[in-house]
Image (cartoon, rainbow, N blue to C red):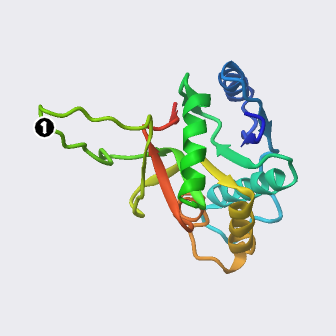
């Protein structure tokens, strides 16, 4: 799908980069790698107790900036240690239709969850027919930013909200900022899981 760009970053781990490139090339998508933000980056305040977490969030903001300068309509942002589904392209197409239909800001395609998000109830006399993905709202107890989808309108809103990180509450982490932002939903089953 040529209107999608995928972004990631890696803290100088060439083996993870190699594995991720292979996984995404297998399903027809190149990854755009953004330079890692180190804890020594001048944007990371020296007084922040969780300097690495802060740097990771800044990397997410850098990925959003890169996406805005691209010609892609949708950006997918992911960690450098995920597995993706073999039917990634097919399910991504369904996810994007749902994203647009629901007018979402953020759609999580990979996340951490300790519970089943829904349980279909059917009797023996019926067959459950459903789209390949369930799209569900979620509360703040859901954790993880393994993979998420935004469009350019949402990317601009995220950057406007989180770029001045000196005035935001801590922790300054994508798990507590980006994934909790605006109108949001998850897809189930996930398109990506952490290694």
* Of 174 and 101, the residue lying toward us: 101
Quarter holding the N terminus is top right
To which quarter of the image does residue 167 belong? bottom right
* Of 178 and 55, the residue lying toward us: 178
Q: Residues within 10 Å of mark 1 (few under 14, many from 20)?
A: few
- Which residue reaches farthest front? 125
To which quarter of the image does residue 151 belong? bottom right
Q: Residue at x 23, y 32 (%)?
A: 127
Residue 24 as seen in the image, left or right of residue 187: right
Question: Up-down: is 120 above or below 62?
Answer: above
Mark 1 lies on residue: 123
Work out whether residue 38 can be spotted: no
To which quarter of the image does residue 62 belong? bottom right
- Which residue reaches farthest left? 124
Which percent across, then down, holds residue 102? 53, 58
* Of 64 and 2, the residue lying toward us: 2
Q: Residue at x 75, y 66 (%)?
A: 156
């Amino acid at each position: 799908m040529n209107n999608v760009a995928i972004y990631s970053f890696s803290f100088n781990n060439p083996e993870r980069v190699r594995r991720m490139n292979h996984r995404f090339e297998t399903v027809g998508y190149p990854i755009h790698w953004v330079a890692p933000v180190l804890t020594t980056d001048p944007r990371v305040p020296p007084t922040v107790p969780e300097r690495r977490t802060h740097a990771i969030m800044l990397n997410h903001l850098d990925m959003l900036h890169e996406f805005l300068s691209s010609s892609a309509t949708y950006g997918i942002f992911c960690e450098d240690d995920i597995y993706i589904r073999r039917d990634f392209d097919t399910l991504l197409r369904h996810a994007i239709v749902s994203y647009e239909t629901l007018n979402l800001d953020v759609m999580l395609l990979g996340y951490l969850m300790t519970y089943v998000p829904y349980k279909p109830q059917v009797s023996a006399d019926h067959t459950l027919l459903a789209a390949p993905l369930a799209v569900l709202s979620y509360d703040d107890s859901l954790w993880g930013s393994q993979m998420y989808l935004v469009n350019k309108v949402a990317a601009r809103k995220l950057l406007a909200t989180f770029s001045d990180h000196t005035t935001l509450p801590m922790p300054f982490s994508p798990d507590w900022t980006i994934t909790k932002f605006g109108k949001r939903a998850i897809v189930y089953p996930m398109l990506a899981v952490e290694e």
